[in-house]
Amino acid sequence: MRIKHVCMAVLITLSIGFTGVANAEYPERPINMIVAAAPGGGTDIMARTMVPYMEKYLGGATISVLNKPGAGTEVGATALAKAKPDGYTIGMLNFPHMIAIPIERKTAFSIDSFELLANLVTDASAFNVSANSPFSTVEDVVKYAKENPLALTVGTTGFGGDDHLAMLAFEKVAGIKLTHVPFPSGAPIRAALMGGHISIGSFNVSEGIEFAKEGQLKILGVMDTKRWEKAPEIPTFKEQGYNVIMSAQRGMGAPKGVPADRLAKLVAAIEKTVKDPEFIAQADKMKLPIDYIAGQAYHDMLYQMQDDLKQMWAKEPWKK
């Protein structure tokens, strides 16, 4: 009889324990954040700057950054798309890369594979050269390239990314031919550039500005409608006679199918983070061009980008 009572007590205790687990408040365990780029690039810096604030606004959660670079963000995007949609895997979204790649070839993901949480950064494309480069202006590049077709090598983060599309647009406007050299992410391009292995690095202005200020490289121009307020000394391409406008959108997403209540918590944590004065100060220190866009506006922006890229591909593919 006593054994029966003990067994019953154990069963009741286990039942209460399991009920507690089932009803635990999200997030009850660590969250993985996939970054489809190598450490040190703009996407990685943005993710790691966000993490401590998101942890705070998710009630003390733990978020681990997992770098999965390769194939122009395809490796990381595939991992995010295939992750269990339970809210415990989120990731940085890189556009136009993650829209362009499924247009040019068959992939295991598309924009429809993700819950689109928010855009965080809009980062203008730029042409960067080493500090000892003979080029100081965009016109210098054009003049040399016209006299030496295909002689200049340009590092980008892969086919169909903003860096590559920027190069192609510049070639067309300037009437020149450059040689494309793809890399897995921005940090390796910068290393190759400063090591003298490529002529030009096509990467976003925020990824090069600190190195420019330290005298390790020169930024020839930004591909925006106006000068960047954090570096007003750098002219636009348009000012220099070449109307090329291009930028990267870095946002955050999750696998399709995450429960609505968990998505709401993630979106709320992101919004609170980007409005946090301490985060704003930290982002400013890291030269991150914050551009928070969420909800329907983010959805519409990306699906319009997809339509535009499909039309571009049909007319003039960016990869032969």
Image: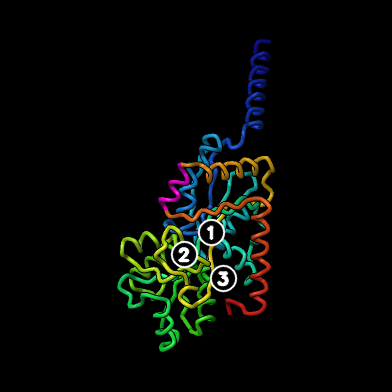
N-terminal-most mark, 2 or 3? 3
- Badge number at residue 227: 2
Image quarter hosting the N terminus: top right
* Image point (43%, 56%), residue name: 39
Is 239 on the left or on the right of 194, as rendered? right
- Give the amino acid type for the residue marked by disc 3 in the picture: Gly
User: Does residue 85 appear in this view?
Assistant: yes
Q: Residue furthest bottom?
A: 147
Predominant secondary structure in magenta?
helix
N-terminal-most mark, 1 or 2? 1
Q: Is residue 266 above or below residue 287?
A: above
Q: At numbered mark 3, what does the secondary structure look like: helix, strand or loop? A: loop
Residues in magenta? 278-286
Q: At numbered mark 1, what does the secondary structure look like: helix, strand or loop? A: strand
Residue count near mark 2 (Cα–Cα under 10 Å), binned few <14, some 14–19, many ≥20? some
Which of discs 1 and 2 lies nearer the camera? The answer is 2
Instruction: Name the residue tied to disc 3.
Output: 160
Instruction: Name the residue tied to disc 1.
Output: 122
N-terminal-most mark, 1 or 3? 1
Q: Residue furthest top?
A: 1
Percent x, y for residue 72? 53, 66
Image quarter hosting the C terminus: bottom right
Q: How far separated are the C-alphas under marks 1 and 2?
A: 14 Å
* Image point (67%, 13%), residue name: 5
- Observer-nearest residue: 73 or 96? 96
- Give the amino acid type for the residue marked by disc 1 in the picture: Thr
* Image point (64%, 75%), residue name: 313
Q: How far separated are the C-alphas under marks 1 and 3?
A: 17 Å
Residue count near mark 3 (Cα–Cα under 10 Å), binned few <14, some 14–19, many ≥20? many
